[in-house]
Amino acid sequence: MALVCAAMSCPILRNKAYTPEKLDLQLDDQVRKFITSSQGFKIDRDRKIVYLSSIFKWYGKDWIASYGIENKFTGSKKETAVLNFISQYLNSQDRQYLEQGKYKISYLNYDWSLNQQDN
């Protein structure tokens, strides 16, 4: 989420340089911004759908080794691993909703149009 493709659905490009002494905090901040954006993750409680970025669909297996596939959340192995990762960035109410498991997972449409810089 630090190196991005500049499409509208990508994580936003950081406007400051990454520095060795702040790298972990900066990377964590990038993840948090993406997860809390409408392009990264959202819950529709009325329809009982959890929406994930298509990035998690394409690269979901990359989270399995680091975040595990314990049966804590709804979904396939890669979706469970992604939710294990995402859940650490959510508020307690959203985490509890995910743990209840009464939802289906859907992926957000990916907007490949070029992200425009605000002047």
Image (cartoon, rainbow, N blue to C red):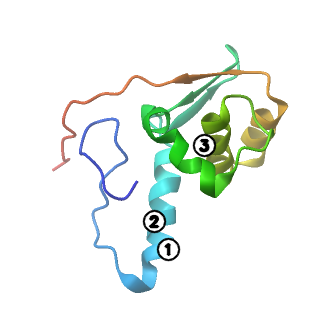
Tell me the residue that label 3 is attached to.
82
Of 88 and 58, nearer the camera is: 58
Farthest left residue in view: 119
**Secondary structure at numbered mark 3:** helix
Question: Based on the displayed image, in which of its 4 quarters is residue 15 positioned?
Answer: bottom left
Q: Type of residue at label 1?
A: Asp
Of 54 and 62, nearer the camera is: 62
Q: Position of residue 66 (x, y in %)?
A: 62, 57
Q: Are marks 2 and 1 in contact (CB under 8 Å)?
A: yes
Farthest top residue in view: 47
The crowding category of the residue bearing disc 3, from other C-alpha atoms within 10 Å (few below 14, some 14 to 19, many at least 20), is many
Q: Do the residues labelled 3 and 2 touch (CB within 8 Å)?
A: no
Question: Based on the displayed image, in which of its 4 quarters is residue 20 positioned?
Answer: bottom left
Seen at 32% across and 60% down, the residue is 14
Tell me the residue that label 1 is attached to.
24
Question: Distance of mark 1 from mark 3, alpha carbons?
Answer: 19 Å
Q: Which mark is residue 55?
A: none
Q: Type of residue at label 2?
A: Leu
Q: Position of residue 5 (x, y in %)?
A: 25, 46
**Secondary structure at numbered mark 1:** helix
Taking the image as drawn, is residue 89 in sight? no
Question: Distance of mark 2 from mark 1, alpha carbons?
Answer: 5 Å
Farthest right residue in view: 100
Q: Which mark is residue 27?
A: 2
Q: Position of residue 2 (x, y in %)?
A: 36, 59
Question: Distance of mark 3 from mark 2, alpha carbons?
Answer: 17 Å
